[in-house]
Amino acid sequence: MELSNTYRNLLQIPQNQVYILSPDDPIDLSAIKLGILFVLAKWSMASQKSFRTLNNVMKEFQEKLYFKLYIANTDDRQTEQFIVRNGDVPSGGGETYWIKDGNIAAKMASYDDSQAPKVRSNLSLLADSAAP
């Protein structure tokens, strides 16, 4: 999967911090020390809104915190299994998981700019971790 121009234009962090997950591999949180997993739905306006809000908030943390943004395609079987395994329902709402030391520290879906304070709070959960 490649990011469409719509999503690429919403990115507010350097490209070297963005990692597109393979549809063939299971999502393995244990390999993530500090990151955000975003479940992208190309067809969903809710996903675009969530991605825009997330990126605007991530930009604020750019100087304070090193993290990677992992992007998974909601239409991939491995992604759907991950979402269900974590007690959620695939919705195309830009399901977002804040990962610290291989564990989910917070999660949200279907959010927009009005919920930026909550997104900011979730990202600050990662802020006390050192750069890799």
Image: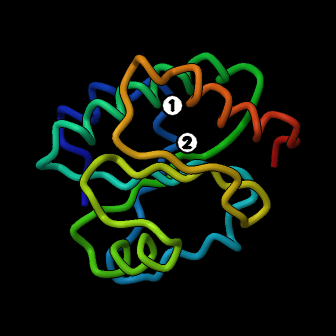
Q: Residue at x 26, y 74 (%)?
A: 76
Which of 58/83 is in front? Answer: 83
Asked whether the beta carbons under mark 2 and mark 1 sit within 8 Å of each other, the answer is: yes
Quarter holding residue 72: bottom left
Disc 2 designates what residue? Answer: 17
| SS for dot 2 | helix
Residue 30 location in percent, x, y?
70, 73
Q: Residue at x 34, y 47 (%)?
A: 94
On screen, residue 116 versus residue 1, left or right, reads: right
Dot 2 amino acid type: Gln
Q: Residue at x 18, y 42 (%)?
A: 4
Residue 50 location in percent, x, y?
36, 35
- Dot 1, crowdedness within 10 Å: few (<14), some or many (≥20)? few
| SS for dot 1 | loop
Disc 1 designates what residue? Answer: 14
Which of 113/129 is in front? Answer: 113
Compared with residue 65, is residue 77 higher up or lower down, i.e. above or below? below
